[in-house]
Amino acid sequence: MLKNIWYCIKKTSEWYFALLVLYIILTLVNATIPILSAFLPKLVIEKLTLGSDIKGLIGTIMVFMGSIAVLTGVSKFLTKYLYFEKFSINVHYLKLVANKGLTTDYINQENGIFRKLQEESFLCCNGHSPLTQVYDVLQSLGTSVLGIAVFSAVLYKLNVAVILFIVVTTAVSFYLNKRVVKWTDEHSKERMSYVQRLNYINAISGDARSAKDIRLYPMAKWFSDIYTDNMKGIAAWYHKLTKKLFSVTACDGALGLLREGIIYLYLIYLFMNGQISVADFVLYFGVVTGFSAWLSEIFAEVSVLNQLSTKINRFREYLDFPEEYLREGGLHPNQDKLPKVIELKNVSFRYEENQPYVLENFNLAINPGEHLAVVGLNGAGKTTLVKLICGLIDPTEGQVLYDGKSIAEYDRVELYRMYSAVFQQFSIMPVTVEEIVAEAPATQVDSERVKKCLELAGMWERIQKLPNKLQSQFGRTIYEDGVEFSGGETQKLLLARAMYKSSPIMLLDEPTAALDPIAESEIYHKYNQISEGKTTVFISHRLASTNFCNRIILIEDGAICEEGTHRELLDKKGKYYNLFEMQAKYYREEEVVE
Ligand code: ADP
């Protein structure tokens, strides 16, 4: 906990040192107000009973009241000011989370644990985040500690046993309350499961995509029953909590009554015996109440800090999530733009330890300038192979060599410059069309090159028809008048982007799956022209589209099961032939039906 508090303080002092100073001032101010308020009645009574002159009395009251008024004003102002100012720190934390997500080893983004930590870390920086809540709790804790130090000194003069008595009874109260908190924590999963189911049904009841299924398969009644069951479940859960809260509150109240009752009786006894004056009686009266209130706060605040610390631990675990890939200090690939030999040597890969291998003892050499096609059924491991080739993921066993050296030895950022790719799962940012193709801000875009690439990808005419042409904004998520493209058009745009990057190695993972056969054939024709001299790895499940490749490998069960040119593989009459025939038959039958 202390380490996490120190972490938050250190970060804040880097970003906004004045915030810490203001919190310290607020702590001092908040501790001084109740101390002054406790001493004022004693002083007034003393002056009255000792027959002090009226001017002196009014002067003392004015000084005290004036100070309390000014300090209260300062406290209110600082509390409001800091309430809003502390949120500015969240932006700094958010930037750390986003940066980690953007630059972390790619494999981390496929790791369930990392993704969960990432989600929690984003939540950690929103609104009342634990990272900024720490200041408020520390400020209250500081106030309580300062106050209790002064009040302890006062009570020490009275009787040490009084302090011990208050500490013990307050600790018992705290323990009782803590049991309710513990019960809530232990049973929060049960509550969450009800809430999640209710939220799920709420969400799909207004979801247009689910609306068809809900009606055609009569699911409304089924969902309605689930809703009722979960509502009953959540009501029963809160009923149990309320019962617990009631009994704890009753015990807590009785304990408070007992504590203060006994001490007040003791004070009355001392007063009756002439051991304390009226002024002291009034002072102790206030101090006892204040002491136990501050003590409860200290217990509560330490407990809150503990809870916050658990969340901050997860946040820091995310930021410190291990990075295995080399960056600075790694080898730089030769940027002479000539394709290099890429070799997979005895490569085995699995996504998680307890999962089967996707590729096992896999060997493949891709020659410079070669156009290699990778075919196979869904789930055969084609995309995994492409990710291994470009170093997005590292083999579990074996090596991937780039120009004879393991890619683990390269600066990964530099290595990625050598590849341009079109993946099945793609992301297009909501920026202008030319910025999408160039993957760079407008000031760095070579518009002529963008135009050439869009022409080659067969997308130029479509862009020309847009009102703002290359400057049209993509997507409706941010821009109301943003343009949307069909699946096929998007793939053309992605192809243009891959061409613009002009890297020596092209990786195309089903880049034409959403195109009709005519557009597909046109693109391959053009692609063949521009990819002259480039190494290309091309994935497809449509075997006919691999014609233009120099070599085809068929993957099955994590290994290469057939290899050769399209003609050689057909002549072999093996698995490739069978697959090809199956697909061809499908098309032929379609022709017959037409
Ligand atoms: P293909 O591209 O041939 O369809 P993939 O390489 O995408 O096949 O997937 C190969 C196997 O690896 C599949 O069984 C798939 O479920 C699994 N797989 C793919 N990505 C992940 C991942 N991130 N985590 C766990 N398993 C994965």
Image (cartoon, rainbow, N blue to C red):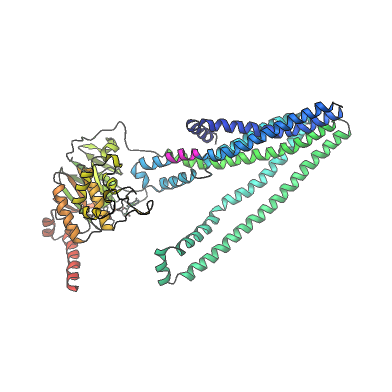
Q: Is residue 483 magenta?
A: no
Judged by its main secondary structure, the magenta piece is helix
Left or right of 332, for residue 23: right
211 horizontally vs 451: left or right: right
Identified at 34% across, 44% down, the residue is 107
Q: Is residue 83 visible?
A: yes
Residue interval drawn in magenta: 88-95
Q: Which is more toward the observer, 531 or 410?
A: 531
Seen as rendered, the residue at the extreme right is: 273
Q: In the rendered image of this protein, does residue 577 appear above or below residue 533?
A: below
Q: Quadrant of residue 229?
A: bottom right
Specify the quadrant of the image occupied by residue 502. Answer: top left
Quadrant placement of the C terminus: bottom left
Is 155 in front, or is 526? 526
Residue 54 in the image: x percent, y percent? 83, 28
Q: What percent of the width, then of the height, locates residue 34?
A: 71, 35
Q: Is residue 90 magenta?
A: yes
Q: How many marks?
A: 0
Image coordinates of residue 433 in percent, x first then y, are 28, 49
Residue 346 shows in this picture: no
